[in-house]
Image (spheres, rainbow, N blue to C red):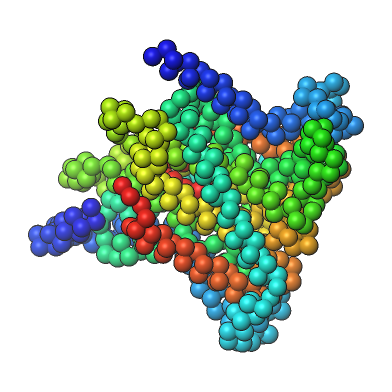
Amino acid sequence: MSSLRVSRIIITILMSAAGIIFLLPFVWMLSASFKPELEVLAYPIQWIPETWNAVENYREVWFGTLPFALYYWNSIKITLLTTAVSLITSAMAAYGFSKISFKGRDVIFIMVLATFMIPHQAILVPQFVLFRWLGLFDSHTGIVLLGSAGAIGTFLLRQFFMSVHNEIIESARMDGANHWTIFVRITLPLVKSALATLMILRFIWTWNDYQNPLIFLRSDHLYTLQLGMRKFSDVNGEFYSLMMAAAVSAILPLMIIFIIGQKQVIEGVAQGSVKG
Amino acid sequence: MEQTVQETGAMKNMVPRKKRKNLTQDTLAGYLFISPMLIMTVVLMVIPILLSGIISFTDWNFIAGLKSINFIGFDNYTKMLSDENFTRSLANNFLLMIVIPVSLFIALILAVLINKATYFKSVFKVIYFMPFISSFVAVAILWRVLFHPTSGPINGLLMSIGIDNPPAWLADPSFSLISVMIIMVWAGIGFEMIIFMAGLQNIPQDLYEAADIDGASKIRQFFSVTLPLLSPTTFFLLITGIVGSFKAFDLIMILTNGGPAGSTSVIVFYLYEVAFIQLKSGYASAIGIALLLLILAITVIQWIGQKKWVNY
């Protein structure tokens, strides 16, 4: 038994070493963001900066020539709205597809499911034309709608709604409750954990989305953080310390959300087996 | 499951008027519940893909407006075959597939070790999952510096251990794709590992106990119990990995912009270039439809293959 324990400890130590190596790029990024520019590329690598330049770097990112704070705010706004719209529409559709029986339901569901296979890039041109025609081009509304569309949330939630027993719903109906009341009062609380998972995943996907803003936003003041990062790196391409400070600023909110909701995210990914 | 729902629905049809009224109400309620999602999906995805199909048979340029549209039959599709940029991008896509078995192999080993052998499971999960939640923009910007040919830390390390002429990585056409692949492995392992770990949880523990009694070594157990029982998971990851590799856009756009000399261009990147830089909407749509067909083919293979190659 004790030899088993020893081997476990050895493997844990080896795995920790591997884990640290795996994370080194992130550590390097963080450390570079604290350094004065001249020391960033010095070799051997100083993991702990000799001279601290953190305040100056982050101040330059946040209050420098580019409106980084505005990009940040745009991203927060788009991400929150997209998450909300996507959560509400997916939950409603998931309830409809699992708890109400109506004509054509299964055919529609299969059709919606088939949109999974459509590669985003294959529909960019028609979407672009459509958006200009609808006046949604170069607007946050357009980005929110694009981000909320899609079957993945409905699909994920439907599985959880299906596990809610039909008897509960039948008896509520007997008592005269309509579907909306049942949806809000009975089923939503029962699938709370699935909603949390979808919420976190949708937040991550929207926050990191680069392609939609790139194609559907033109005006600088509407840029999201990811677009702003790209612009920042074009402007400050040679200032690695600043770029790393910007990258840290972009990743940090997600890291915090991830560490708080770690269990939900990982389980959600494992259960839904979905990829953004 | 579906069937029982339908049957009760059919049974309701035969019973009293009140129930029938309920049924029309149900239909109305059902459509109301799915309509917000359905309208968005139809307007933003179904109609665009149909339009894409139509545009792919034209020489349209969306800046020029509808008047200049000409139907040219299958020309766009035949053009693709002789378009060097397209075939090179397609070839790069196939090369990128090498990433999947490599990262699956590493992810599987990590999953087994973490699952069986180590303490602090959740800490390890978090560590390997971090790149998955980081934005590709930030990751790409970071790796561009790490891979810097003359003064990046990676080449600094290589030179300090005696390699005098380390590769120029992203800047060298013959190493650029490999560099992209290294980053993709690093970014993808976490997701695959999590799925493998979920698969491992589903393997009944008594199979290992039985193997122990039969005197099978740990390594033997891995090959004759773990691996076969994980085959559905592996297969799933293989397919999602292949489909996902065809959609890799953000990373390549920021890392290399398809360069140097087109050495990292992939189909979706080339499609973007044709559509929004060269403004050839017709041709871009044809490439999009070709990509859709390719993904469709992979999905069909998945359906057939799951029955054939996966053993439970």
Q: Identify the residue at the far left of this view.
A: B15
Residue at 36%, 52% (x, y): give it. Answer: B310
| Relative to B282, residue A269 above or below | above
Tell which of A73 and B119 is nearer to you: B119
- Residue at screen point 30% across, 39% down: A186
Q: Quadrant of residue B278?
A: bottom right
Quick one: which residue is furthest to the right in this view? A38
With respect to residue A146, does A38 lie above or below? above
The quarter of the picture where the N terminus of chain A appears is top left
Q: Where is residue B143, by image quadrant?
A: top right
Count how many numbered circles sit on residues in the image.
Answer: 0
Residue in front for this viewpoint, A104 or A263: A263
Whether residue B261 appears in this view of the structure is yes
Task: Spot the residue most to the top.
Answer: A2
Q: Position of residue A197 (x, y in %)?
A: 45, 39
Point out residue A155 in the picture as x, y percentages from the top left corner.
Answer: 40, 51
Q: Nearer the viewer, residue A261 or A223?
A: A261
**For the point 90% across and 32% down, which residue is it?**
A38
Q: Position of residue A163 (x, y in %)?
A: 28, 43
- In the figure, B36 relative to B51: above or below? above
Q: Is residue A93 left or right of residue A19?
A: left
